[in-house]
């Protein structure tokens, strides 16, 4: 990776304060729990952070933060569920660029590729694309 997801998470988290309004204190508490613990305690804080993000659909920095910490979950516990969560979050984030920090867009796009690769969904190479284009579709 061309960036450090942990540092990007910290930066995005601090930029999220105005986005979360009265939920900022809860976010700080959950982030501190997530950062200070491992295992079930960290996983529970992580799940609550994701739930908080759903309550704030326009909190772009906070959503980027959640994608970065999902990558941390992948490195902590390499299971398909974390890759799938990361893929879903990053696809949703990248669906629109409006109001999002260019650096976060670039980093999330890179993570998106990593989540895809972790699930075995690497981009098709030129030969695969050409084969699909030349293969007859349906019919007799």
Image: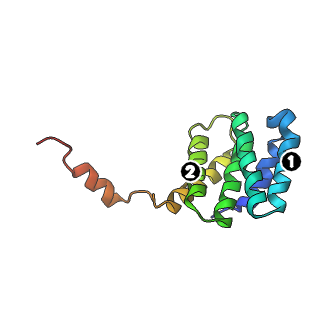
Residue 14 visible in the displayed image: yes
Query: Along the line of sight, which residue is nearer the eye, 78 or 128?
Result: 78
Above or below 45: residue 3: below
Position of residue 113 in the picture relative to residue 19 (left or right) = left
In the picture as drawn, the residue positioned furthest to the left comes out as 140
- Residue at position x 75%, y 46% in the image: 48
The percent coordinates of residue 133 (x first, y second) are: 26, 49
Colour scheme in use: rainbow
The numbered mark at residue 87 is 2
In the picture as drawn, the residue positioned furthest to the front comes out as 40
The numbered mark at residue 91 is none
- Residue at position x 70%, y 59% in the image: 5
Quarter that holds the C terminus: top left
The percent coordinates of residue 79 (x first, y second) are: 58, 62
- Label 1, secondary structure: give it: helix
The percent coordinates of residue 113 (x first, y second) are: 54, 56
Query: Along the line of sight, which residue is nearer the eye, 131 or 27?
Result: 27
Quarter that holds the N terminus: bottom right
Position of residue 113 in the picture relative to residue 23 (left or right) = left
Q: In this figure, what is the number of numbered marks? A: 2
Dot 1 or dot 2, earlier in sequence: 1
Query: Along the line of sight, which residue is nearer the eye, 1 or 6?
Result: 6
- Label 2, secondary structure: give it: helix
Q: Callout 1: 10 Å neighbours few (<14), some, many (20+)?
A: some
- Residue at position x 74%, y 43% in the image: 62
The percent coordinates of residue 122 (x first, y second) are: 45, 59
Q: In which quarter of the image is residue 52?
A: top right
Above or below 30: residue 35: below
Distance in Å between CA atoms under marks 1 and 2: 25 Å
The numbered mark at residue 28 is 1
Q: Quadrant of residue 111?
A: bottom right
């Amino acid at each position: 990776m061309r960036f450090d997801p942990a540092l990007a998470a910290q930066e995005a988290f601090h930029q999220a304060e105005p986005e979360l309004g009265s939920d900022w204190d809860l976010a700080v508490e959950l982030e501190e729990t997530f950062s200070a613990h491992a295992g079930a305690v960290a996983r529970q804080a992580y799940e609550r952070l994701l739930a908080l993000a759903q309550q704030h659909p326009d909190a772009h920095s906070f959503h980027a933060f959640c994608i970065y910490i999902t990558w941390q979950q992948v490195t902590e516990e390499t299971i398909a569920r974390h890759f799938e969560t990361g893929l879903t979050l990053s696809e949703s984030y990248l669906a629109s660029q409006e109001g999002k920090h260019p650096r976060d867009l670039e980093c999330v796009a890179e993570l998106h590729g990593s989540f895809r690769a972790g699930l075995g969904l690497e981009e098709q190479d030129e030969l695969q694309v050409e084969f699909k284009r030349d293969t007859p579709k349906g019919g007799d």
